[in-house]
Image (spheres, coloured by chain):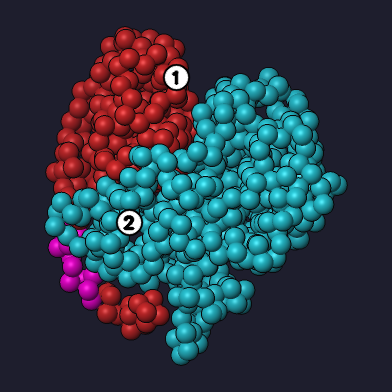
Chain colours: A cyan, B red
Amino acid sequence: MAGKTLYDKLWDSHVVREESDGTCLIYIDRHLVHEVTSPQAFEGLRMAGRKPWRNTSIVANPDHNTPTKDWDKGIEDPISRLQVETLDNNIKEFGALVYFPFKNKDQGIIHVIGPENGTTLPGMTVVCGDSHTSTHGAFGALAHGIGTSEVEHVLATQTLVAKKSKRMLVRVDGQLGKGVTAKDVALAIIGKIGTAGGTGYAIEFGGEVIRALSMEGRMTLCNMAIEAGARAGLVAPDEKTAAYLEGRLHAPKGENWTKAVAYWNTLQSDADAQYDTVVALNGADIAPQVTWGTSPEQVLPIGSTVPDPAKEADTTKRTSIENALKYMGLNANTPIDQIQLDKIFIGSCTNSRIEDLRAAASVAKGKKVASNIKLAMVVPGSGQVKRQAEEEGLDKIFIEAGFEWREPGCSMCLAMNSDRLSPGERCASTSNRNFEGRQGPGGRTHLVSPEMAAAAAIAGHFVDVRSA
Amino acid sequence: MKAFTTLNGLVCPLDRANVDTDAIIPKQFLKSIKRSGFGPYLFDEWRYTNYGEPGMDCSTRPLNKDFVLNQPRYQGAQVLLARDNFGCGSSREHAPWAIEDQGFRVIIAPSFADIFFNNCYKNGILPIVASAEQVDQLFKECLANEGYKLSVDLVAQTVTMPSGQSFSFEITPTRKHNLLNGLDEIGLTLQHADDIRAFEVKHKAAQPWLFA
């Protein structure tokens, strides 16, 4: 019998029961909750007279609607405020292990606060009504996004009705060049397999490049698994995982810590494990990436030119390129490093952790944001990240360079609060989606790494951070 | 959840690949704490020429006449015909809520994004995966024939065209059963509460730190 993949091990250890058609009831260890996708689930629970099965599995926090400045004014938009207050009231009524209300010193993006408080652990199943739950797979946890009906299902039963996914291994061997980051690896993978390449799969990321990535880098990579169509991304835990978790608020302590680490060491794919698909890349071939279109797969290395639809034979693809260029206001064959920008956004659950901010600050240090940039903003992922950055003086570097230093939240990744692009504005963004209207109606998003975003802020247009 | 058995419905063709959930229902409408009333905002940025805000009366908003949903021949459509990777992006269930509220009960596409696909079943919507060639044929026939309808039979797992030609589709027995009967999944799962409790005891013994 062939060995098991990491995904098989995580799945098998959570099956409560299995129907004859392969539909399973999967036990959920950790339930992350935010204000946007939970109100209807709590309301459903209330209407059915049900209670959460295990409220100590819940880690909750508002993040999508919260403003990133003028916190003393509260939430000005009454509809946003009601949604955040609804979460406050639901947690008060139903309970949670962790709740950081708006303006709490530790509040932040749910996918940043989970790991930093030790509430995401290897071997867990983690769900959230948010597609970027794949982030937590960086710890060797089976983590994926769910809809609101499933949020209610997990609240009421601590389980999910699910079928096993296929298994894909994405191997990245070799070494990354200077200035090339986990974000570039993620975008290069999506460029190779497409935004539907991972549909139906759980992707395990392996190889020398992945092992060399920090936990922050692995979170960036797994975060973007959903942009490749895979609900879950995974990296096997190792000594870096344990080192990151040790001593965190809810991480195991004492005897439990020793036992936990021993168990986590078994969470590796067996040498003879079989995958349904294997994709291989070489780290040395990956250059800093920039998306040019309205889907994350519309991505190219810096140094390329925007594609020419006339050279595309496939009709559907040609139409997609034409639509994207029209929306993005770009001409075919324009060199990417000549694309001028209006705004810069450094933040989001993809790239708002301390390492991301350090990397961006190292590029911005002693320089000034270009005069054509209307707004360059840095939005830390959480209160903890913000304090750490301020202790290191990163806030001063950004402010002196002309960036705005904001309060934590999802902010302009999806523009549910007032941080957004105006129609036609062009943004270099460290977030995860360049869909039409994502950062504001008519806004134009180019996805890049924190280093590339900072370098673009200084130059006023895209540049190769390796030679900036 | 509404049950689904059969449907003979008008088809609306949305000829675009990679339609994401931000396009299906833009973020500003996600601020609602209700699960109904999203239909008028379905495809908001494509459908209207002004910027939509929650609570707006959509009957007075300027329409984008070129957008397929606004064309008179597709009014009252119940079957949405789409291209590859429909529903990609965010997990927002507001997307199927908006589609259902608009009156669609069936979506036919060559492929769907996983989370969206799963969310459809929770809301009485039947997502049907058909081959790219089959979908191409449906687009051609639909565009060529005003009033083009398809008959969908969940019991037989078939889609029948006006010509009488038909094709079959796959669905797991569990999903089919739940959809045919409009079952409350939470109620069904709670019938296995003893299994969940037994699993929890075993799981806690093996990994006590998960319950600390």
Residue name at image x 53 percent, y 80 percent:
A247
Q: Is residue A280 left or right of residue A91?
A: right
Residue A202 visible at all: no
| Vertical comparison of A20 with B121: above or below | below
Of labels 1 and 2, the one closer to you: 2
Q: How many marks?
A: 2
Residue A408 visible at all: yes
Question: Picture coordinates of residue B186 (x, y %)?
Answer: 20, 55
Which residue bears the numbered disc 1?
A: B50
Q: Amino acid at mark 1?
A: Asn
Q: What segment is highlighted magenta in the picture? A: B187-198
Q: Quadrant of residue A220?
A: bottom right
Residue name at image x 59 percent, y 50 percent:
A406
**Residue A335 belongs to magenta span:** no
Question: Picture coordinates of residue A92 (x, y %)?
Answer: 28, 62
| Vertical comparison of B47 with A265: above or below | above
Look at the numbered disc 2 and give the secondary structure of its residue. Answer: helix
Q: Foreground residue, A403 or B36? A: A403
Looking at the image, the residue that sits furthest to the bottom is: A255
On whether disc 1 and disc 2 are found on a single subunit, the reply is no
